[in-house]
Amino acid sequence: MGYAVHRLLIINALLHLCIVVSAVKADEHDVAIMVAKQNIEYLQRLYARATDQIGTNLPENIEAGREVYHRIFTSDATIRASDPSGSQFSVTGPDEWVKVVDGALSVFDSTQHLLGTQIVELESMPDADGRAGKGKMSSFLQAWHQDDDRVIDIYLGTYFSKVRYTKGVGWQIYDMQLEKVAGEVIHKRPQSPELKITSELDRK
């Protein structure tokens, strides 16, 4: 085998190795982005579950919800939302938001917060030292609240959350805005005896 051919084979092998290494690095980067997006999405999902825990009005569940809030929000997080009447709430920090949520949901017997479409946009990934990771997320909300004696309150909205990576903790929300899209409050009224009789005759 001539020297030129041998050299060409070595160059081809090195080029192939570079391509393989580049592909592996690209795959690892794609996987890291995918994992980051999933972790960010779970922040809002955990928020929904914690909010329903607080909505039970049980002291132990309120504290369990508070613990989750402290995990998913930064200590200086700005949190804003509008209630069904259109009033705006804005506080700083998870403990203050627990007060808002507890006050808003304490009048209901039960609640359920459902998340639909979630879109995460990463601005940057954290570096090797766990710095610089930032992004944003939008999440569709359908919330159902019930008071057995009075009303059913349906709230449709969208969460707009800004997130950053905290070293030793992971992704956290540092700014969250809940914008109301639509809603309905159904007032429960006792059915009159005449209507009950009519309904029974119609069924027969």
Image (tube, rainbow, N blue to C red):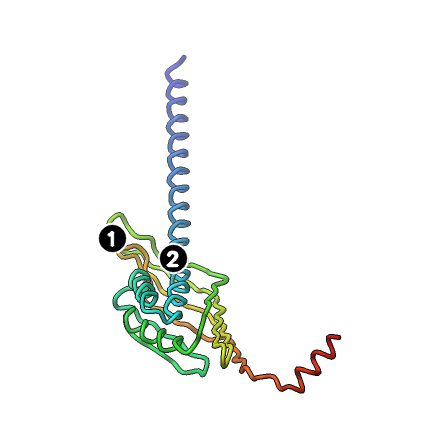
Callout 2: SS: helix
Relative to 85, 75 lies left or right: left
Give the CA separation, mark 1 to mark 2.
15 Å
In the image, what residue occupies the spot 41% across and 12% down? 1
Residue located at (41% from left, 78% from top): 107
In the picture, the quarter occupied by the C terminus is bottom right
Of residues 193 and 111, the one nearer the viewer is: 193
Q: What residue type is labelled 1?
A: Gly
Residue marked by disc 1: 168
In the image, taking residue 182 as reference, residue 174 lies left or right, namely: left
Residue 52 x %, y %: 41, 67
Disc 1 crowd, CA 10 A, few/some/many (<14, 14-19, 20+): few
**Outermost residue toward the top?**
1
> Which residue is drawn at the image coordinates 30% and 54% (left, top)?
170
Return the residue at label 2. Answer: 40
Q: Residue 8 at what x, y percent from top left? A: 40, 23
Q: Which residue is drawn at 45% across and 70% down?
A: 111
Choose between 14 and 180: the one closer to the eye: 180
Q: Determine whether label 1 and label 2 are within 8 Å by CB.
A: no
Look at the picture and state if 36 lies above or below 26: below
**x then y, percent, for residue 45:** 42, 60
Mark 2 residue type: Ile
Q: Where is residue 122 in the image (x, y as percent from the top left)?
A: 38, 57
